[in-house]
Image (spheres, rainbow, N blue to C red):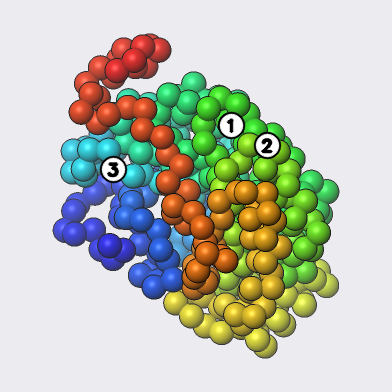
Amino acid sequence: MKGGSGGLRLGVLSVFDPWNSPLCVCPFKYSLNPYTGCSIGCRYCYATSYIGVKPSTPKRRLVRRLERDLGRIPPGALVNIGTSSDPYPPEEEKLGFTRRALEVLAPRGYRLLITTKGTLYAWRDLDILSRANAAITPSITGLGGNSLLRAVEPGAPGQDERIAAAAAAVRSGVPVGVRVDPVIPYVNDDPHELKELVGRLAEAGVRFIVTSTYKARPDNLSRMRRALGAEGERLYRLYRERGVYMHGYIYLPEEVRRRLLKPVIEEAARLGLEYATCREGFTGREWFNAGSCDGSHLIPIRISPRRAGAIEKWLEGGRP
């Protein structure tokens, strides 16, 4: 099920629906974005096409609206936090809206998947996540020192910081899968660097890799062109001259996309990791050997929804 909400009237939760793309094979899940807008400001962000470019703004009455929504969805449902606005922008350290959402969701036994470029989860929230039905899928797009990635991810922590955060989560017992996503021509597509990145992720204890090529939309392609100088002009021409419009995005030809992703997939396979591609249409074990494309299969079941009444005890460190 990908389309619509089945008549549900929800406040801050929504049914995950990537424009009904037939190339999306995510399991049915709900989305939660504690913020609108995103201060991390990735130049390639797709969400800006419908919410615009603006800093992270916390949603009003988040906890109250979330608690009301939970009465309208199944116990133990899968909730993906951070599908269109990063849940760990710089503002989160002071405001704590994502932390509050975790305090509501985790003790009740919901399955939680955290998608982020931030690192605060590793230094502040592992006390919750390590006891919850939770997995983390941070986006790590290259190695430290790539100035072009810094130009297109201006508000994100450095790549090495993100790898260190993932390793800290693994040490705390939280399963981690990494999104090597997007792979962008002329920016982070060097096959040797991609293989080295996968190797470092494996050393950090990452169990699963999902990868995808940059799929352009007119607004983010223009931003990428401006941010990248000469490489931006090459990228712009590539997508304008060879791109194909599919399912709301400009895709590169299939043979180009396969070439871009092959180093990631082959190295993951060589190292015995699970791997998948995201909205590429590539099927078969060569491209997809994992239990899900989004990492939700990594989520351990530590809390039963039927035993979610002892919330206060759980928050104090006991077992519900």
Residue underneath mark 3: 77
Specify the amino acid type for callout 1: Val
> Quick check: 298 left or right of 150?
left
Name the residue: 77% across, 51% down. Answer: 196
Residue underneath mark 1: 170
Cα distance between the residues tagged 1 and 3: 23 Å
Locate the N terminus and report the quarter of the image it occupies: bottom left
Graded by Cα atoms within 10 Å as few (under 14), some (14 to 19) or many (20 or more), the crowding at tag 2 reads some
Of pointers 2 and 1, the one earlier in the residue sequence: 1
Graded by Cα atoms within 10 Å as few (under 14), some (14 to 19) or many (20 or more), the crowding at tag 1 reads many
One can see residue 40 in this view: no
Specify the amino acid type for callout 3: Ala
Q: Quadrant of residue 151?
A: bottom right
Residue 45 position in % (x across, y down): 57, 60
One can see residue 262 in this view: yes
Residue underneath mark 2: 204
* Disc 3 + disc 2, Cβ < 8 Å: no
Relative to residue 199, is residue 247 depicted above or below?
below
Name the residue: 77% across, 77% down. Answer: 234
Mark closer to the observer (3, 2): 2
Residue 282 position in % (x across, y down): 52, 71
Q: Secondary structure at mark 1?
A: helix
Q: Nearer the viewer, residue 92 or 177?
A: 177
Residue 70 position in % (x across, y down): 24, 38
Q: Nearer the viewer, residue 75 or 46?
A: 75
> Quick check: 130 left or right of 147?
left
Q: Nearer the viewer, residue 78 or 37?
A: 78
